[in-house]
Image: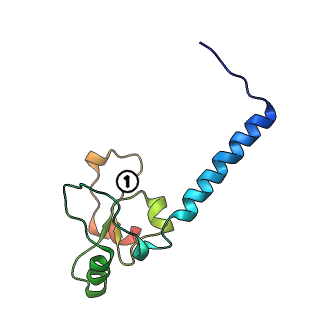
Amino acid sequence: MLRTTLSHSQTRTARSVMVAAFALFLLSAPADIFTATLAESGARTSEVSTRELQDVVARRSATVLDARPRAEYAVSHVPGALTVSAKPGVPLTRTAWSRREREQASR
């Protein structure tokens, strides 16, 4: 197996490029949930548009559940959404949140 050794300056340059690419990725993300767009083509289920979700939230005609990890939910979530992320250390197949737990986690 051929192994290439990078110099210190090459390593720093590569690291700088990766950091810059990651920063560009973060900056290109939508500013908030209401400016997001539908990006997945060929989905088997219908998607809810941003406008439709805004209407649901405004009318409170449905409960919005957020299944992302708690850390992501803490950074940004749809106003009024309840987190239903997996309990730490419990397999997803065994997770069952009580209504009280969901409400406490969403505060």
Coloring scheme of the render? rainbow
In this view of the protein, which residue sits in the foreground, 41 or 58?
41
Residue at the (39%, 58%) spot, across then down: 68
Residue ID for mark 1: 87
SS at mark 1 in the image: loop
Question: Splitting the image into 4 quarters, where does residue 57 fall?
Answer: bottom left
**Residue extending furthest top?**
1
Residue 74 vs residue 55: left or right?
Answer: right
Q: Where residue 69 sits in the image (x, y, percent)?
A: 42, 56
Question: Splitting the image into 4 quarters, where does residue 85 fall?
Answer: bottom left
Q: Where residue 30 sits in the image (x, y, percent)?
A: 48, 69
Question: From the image, which quarter does the C terminus lie in?
Answer: bottom left
Is 4 situated above or below 20? above
Is 29 situated above or below 87? below
Residue 87 vs residue 9: left or right?
Answer: left
Residue at the (19%, 55%) spot, across then down: 44
Is 17 situated above or below 78? above
Residue at the (29%, 76%) spot, across then down: 53
At label 1, the amino acid type is Lys
